[in-house]
Image (tube, rainbow, N blue to C red):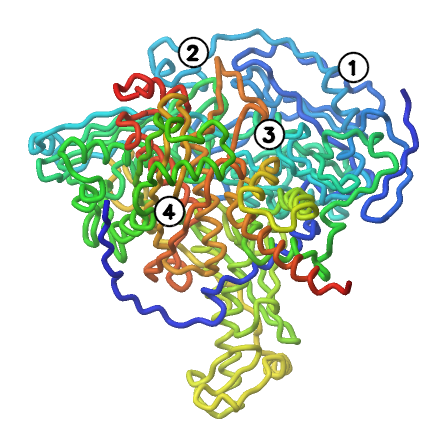
Amino acid sequence: MGPKVISLIVNGRLHHVALAPNVTLLEALRELGYMDVKNGCEKGDCGACAVLLNGLAVNSCLALAWQADGAEIITCAGLGTTEHPHPLQTAFADLGAIQCGYCTPGMIIAAKALLDHNPQPTEEEIREAISGNLCRCTGYGQIVDAVTAAAQMLRHAEGRAPG
Amino acid sequence: MTVRVEPLPHVDLPPLRQVGKPVRRVDVLAKAAGATVYAGDFTLPNMLHARVLRSPHPSAAILRIDVSRARALPGVACVLTAADLPNARLATDIPGQTGQRKRAGSDAQVLAAEVVRFAGEAVALVAAETNALAEQALSLIAVDYEPLPGVFDPFEALKPGAPIVNAPDNVVARWKIRKGDLARGMDEAVTVVENTFRVPFVDHAYIETESGVAWVDERDVINIRVSTQVIEHFRSIAAAVGVPHNKLRVQAAMVGGGFGGKEDITVEIFLGLLAKATRRPVRLVYTREESLLAHSKRHPMVITHRTGVTRGGRITAAEINIVADSGAYPYLSPYVLLYATVVATGPYRIDNVHVDSVVVATNNPFTSAFRGFGAPQACFAHEQQMDECAAAVGMDPLDFRCRNYLRPGDFNATGQEMKGAIWLEETAARALAALGEKTTPAELLEWFRARGDRTRLTADAIRSVRVGQGLASYMQSYGRITWLHDTSQAWVGVELDGSVVIRCGAPDLGGGQMSSLCQIAAEVLGVSLARVSIHAADSAMTPLAGTTTATRQLYMSGNAVLKAAGEVRKTLLQRASYHFEVPAAELDLAEGVVFVKAEPAQQLALAELIAVCAAEGLHLSNLALFTGPFTDRLDPENLSGPVFPDFTFGAQAVEAAVDAETGEVFVLKSVACHDVGRAINPAAVDGQIQGASVQGLGYALMEDFIVEQGVARTPTLTEYLIPTAGDFPTTQAIILESGAGLGPFGAKGIGEPALTPAAPAAANAVANALGARIHALPITPWRVLAAGGLHTSDV
C-alpha cells in the first residue's frame, strides 16, 4: 500500500501530509516538528511520546498516523508556553517535578488526561494514571505533588469562572 | 524500637539571600513547556541519518566484511568499517582529563577490526538520506564471523587457560589495602562473621537514549551537538577522527538523564566520523534496544567480608575480597573498583584491614560508571555485614554502628584522616526515628486496601506478611580522585543593563547543575536569579569545567563560579567605594543595587555602577580556575593515603512488608537523611535524594540486566524493569547542613551518595522481616522463597 494524504490537527494547526501506512503517529509528529513528543522506546514501555488523541492520552509510538486521520491531537507544547504556561506546567516547574525533563511532556499529558475526568484525584489515583510513564530522575514523589497542586489550581480557576 | 535523637552540634551558617532557597530552577519551565531542544531533536538542512551495525556474537573473529551492496543502495551516502579508520582507537580509562597516564591495553575499538569482544560491539556505520534507508543498508552488509570461545564469568576468566579477552591477561586492575595487623585484629575478636554478597548488571535506563547531530562548518570545524556528560571527549574524538583538537567542537545539549551511562563516548565518535566523511549534517539516535546493547552497565561484583568483632561490639578486623566484571573493555573499571575498594569497610573505624580487589575482563557487556561508581555495591555488602555482626554479638543494629562509626580524627581504610563534620549517628538516628514504629497489622490492611490490592483484604490474608525495618549508613566521596588533579573553570561577567552572564563548560544532566551555578552568581553579585543567564557545556565557547561525573560539578564548578563572581564583585565594590566615599567593606550588593550597609538608603543601581565602570575601562568579567587538592598516585599494592577530596555521610531507613507465601516485597516507608553541607537549592536536593532512593530501591528489588553467555536476555524496557510510579512510596528526605563541605558555602555533593544506602537498607528490612538474609540482588520473590519464606515453621 502506498502513501495516503491524511489530515492531522495538532495543537490547533491543520496539517495535510502524505504518509505510508506503517508510519507511526510518533514519527509523523516529530517529522512535522513537534519535538516535544519524545521517543523513549518505540514500544509503549515508557510513555515519553504520550499525546492527547481526541482527548485521550495515547502512546503515539503505538498508534499509526493513519489511525489519527482527522483527529485532534494535543501535545505538551499545545497546553501552554513558557510565557503562558498551563497550571500543570507551572506546578511541575515549581515543585521539583522536573529534573532531566525528558519524560516531562508525556508525564504532563498523562496528568492532563487524568485531571480532565478526575479533577480531585487521590495520590493512588495519580500514581496509577502516570504508571505508564517512566521517569528515571525524580522517583515520582514530586510529580505526584505537582499534579496534586495543579489540580487544586485548576479547581480554583474553575470555581472563579463565570457561570 | 525507640531511637534517641541527640540535638545537632551548633553550626554557624552565614545568612544568604539567594542560596539556600527552594527556587524554581532556571531550566525547568522550558522543559515543562516542551520547549527544550534535546540532542536528538536538532535538525539541519540536508541532514543524513546514521545507523550502526553491531555484532550479534559475544566473541568472534571477523573473517570478511562486504559493504558493496550497502554502498550501492540509492540514498546511502556513506558506509564505514574499521578498514576506513586506520587510527581510530579510543582510550577508555580516563575521560576528560589531559596529560594523564593511560593504562596499557585499555583502548577500545571504534569499529571492530579483526575480532568482536561483546555482543553489541559496533562493526560498521551507515549514513543515508532517511533512517529507513540506513536500516535497509545495514541489512545489506555481509559480515562473516567465526565464533571464538568466550569467557562470561570473572572467576572463570581468572583461571589458567581461560580465553584472553584483551592481551596480556584478563586482569584489568587490582587494588590492595593493608592496614594494621589483620591476624592480630582477628585474634582480638570473639567472633568472626563471614558473608558473601552478589550484585548483578544493571542499566542506567535514562529515558533519552544516546543521540546527537554533527556537521562541518565553514571553518572546517566538526561540530557535534550531543547528549553527553563529558564535552572534553572532544580530544579523543579529534584524535580518532584524525583532526587537530581545535577543529572539533562538542556541545552538550540538555541531557535527558545520564547517571554515568553518558560518561563514556557514545554516538559522538560515530557522528564525527560520518560528518567528516560526508561533509553533510548527520544525526544518530540510538533505539532503546541499541542503547541497552551499546552502553555500559553497573559492575556485577562478588564481595566477601570476614569481620572480627569483640563481645562489646567493637570491630577489630576486616578482610574483604572483591571480584568485579569489567566486560569486554576496561573503560572506567579500574576507578570504579578503586571507589569500591576505598569504601569497602564502610564509614567505620577499623584498625586492621585487608582489602583485595580485582576487576576482570569477560565477553560480557562492558561495565563502567553508574551513579555511585562502585560505592553502592560496597555499601550493599558492608551494611548487611554490619547487621550480621550486630546480630552475632546480640546488639541492636544502630547501637552496633554507633560503637564503630568513624569520628573526626580517625583514619579511614586508606589512612586518610577524617576531618570536619562526620554526621553518621546524627543521620542514622534521624532516619530511623522518622521511620517510626513498625506498621501494625491493622495499618497494613489499610495500606493494601488503599493500594487497591484485592487479595489482601482480611487479617487472614495477611497472615503470611511480615514487616521489617532496616538501616544503612554510608560514606561516599564527592569530587574526583585527587591524583587525577581535577580543575574547573568558569567565566562570570556583568552586562550594561545589570544582568549577569556565566560561561562554564559543565553539562547539565538534569540535576540542576546550571541552575545552582546561576544561584551562586546571583548571591555574590546581588541580583535576582532571573537576571542571571548561563551558557554551558561547549568545548569551543565555554571555559572547560571538567566532567559532570563524580558528584563534582557543584563542588568544582560551583567554586569556580564563586571565585569568578567574587572578582567581579570586588571590582564593582571598589569603584562604588569612590562613589560613596566609604571603604568597599562597608558596601553590599543586593536586589540589583549597591548600597552602604549602615545606611541602605545610600544606594546606586547596579546598571549605573556598571556603566561607570565600563566608561572607565574597568574589567567587568573574570575567568577563574578552581583546583581540587592534588596528591600523588598511591601504590596499588597498598593504598595508603588520601584518594578523595572529601566525603558525604548519611543514612537511609526502610520499612518493608514481605509476603512469605508469595515472596513479594512491598516498601511501606522510606526515610533518607544526609548531611549535604549546605543545600544550595533545597528543592533540588530533595529531588536528588528522592530520585536516587527510587533508583536504589529498584536496584534492591527489581532491576536485573540478565546476560547469558554474553547475550542480553533483557533487551528492552519490557524485560528490563525499572520502578514506575506505582512501585515505591516517596522517600522522605531529611536534609542536614553541617556547612562542612568543600563546595561553595560549605556544600558537599549529594547526587551519587543519595543512591548508595537505599539497597542495603531495603535488604536489611527484608532480612529483619523474614528472619533470613538474602545475599544477592535483586531481592526477587523467588529469592525470598528460597531464603526460607515458605519453609519457616509459622507459615
Specify the label residue B69 is tagged with.
1
Q: Residue beneath label 3, please?
A: B291
Of the image marks 2 and 1, the number of the one nearer the N terminus:
1
The residue tagged with tag 2: helix, strand or loop? loop
Q: Is residue A132 above or below residue B752?
A: above
Q: Quadrant of residue B182 in the image?
A: top left
Placement of the N terminus of chain B among the 4 image quadrants? top left
Q: Residue beneath label 2, please?
A: B163
Q: Are marks 1 and 3 in contact (CB under 8 Å)?
A: no
- How far is mark 2 from mark 1, CA to CA? 35 Å
Q: Residue beneath label 4, please?
A: B671
Q: Are marks 2 and 1 on the same chain?
A: yes
Amino acid carrying mark 3 in the image: Ser
Amino acid carrying mark 2 in the image: Pro
Which percent across, then down, holds residue A62? Answer: 72, 29
Amino acid carrying mark 1 in the image: Arg
Amino acid carrying mark 4 in the image: Val
